[in-house]
Image (spheres, grey):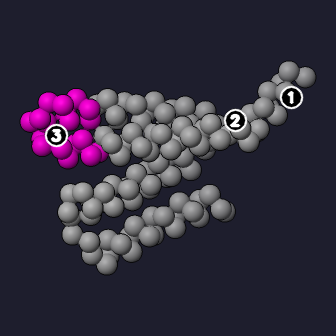
Amino acid sequence: MLLRLQNKLNKHPFIMSIYWLYLLLGIIFEVLGTICMKLADGFSKPIPSILVFVFYGTCLAFLVLVLKKMEVGVAYAIWAGLGTALIAIIGFIWFEEPITIPKVISILFIIAGILGLELF
């Protein structure tokens, strides 16, 4: 009986939404770590250099929590794909990296792949 109750709780929408929140937080900290990597200028700037490790450590901790309930392939694909797309967009806006048609199409393919994993 206790096992049945635990199985019901594990499938409860609120419980699963916590893991989606963990995944979102993991993605945010991964993006912050990558931004700090760029700002660290080859580890020549101490504050961004330290924050690289803090943010990546935090993002991996959230990913470990997510993997308690989500399939590793799906969770990692969403984490890596959204992180990549966000970093590319931030690169265009903040770091003034060039925007090209192939880059935009590639980002759209990443987003389509993530949606495909979730919908099918």
Q: Residue tagged by mark 1?
A: 4
The amino acid type of the residue labelled 2 equals Ile
The amino acid type of the residue labelled 1 equals Arg
Above or below residue 79? Residue 55 is above
Percent position of residue 43, x then y: 13, 36
What's the CA distance linking mark 3 and mark 2? 37 Å
Judging from the image, what secondary structure is the residue with disc 3 in?
Answer: loop
- Residue 40, numbered label: 3
Magenta span contains residue 50: yes
Percent position of residue 82, x then y: 44, 55
Q: Main secondary structure of the magenta part?
A: helix
Q: Residue tagged by mark 2?
A: 15
Percent position of residue 47, x then y: 18, 31
Above or below residue 88? Residue 61 is above
Percent position of residue 103, x then y: 32, 71
Residue depicted at 49% across the width and 52% down the height: 77
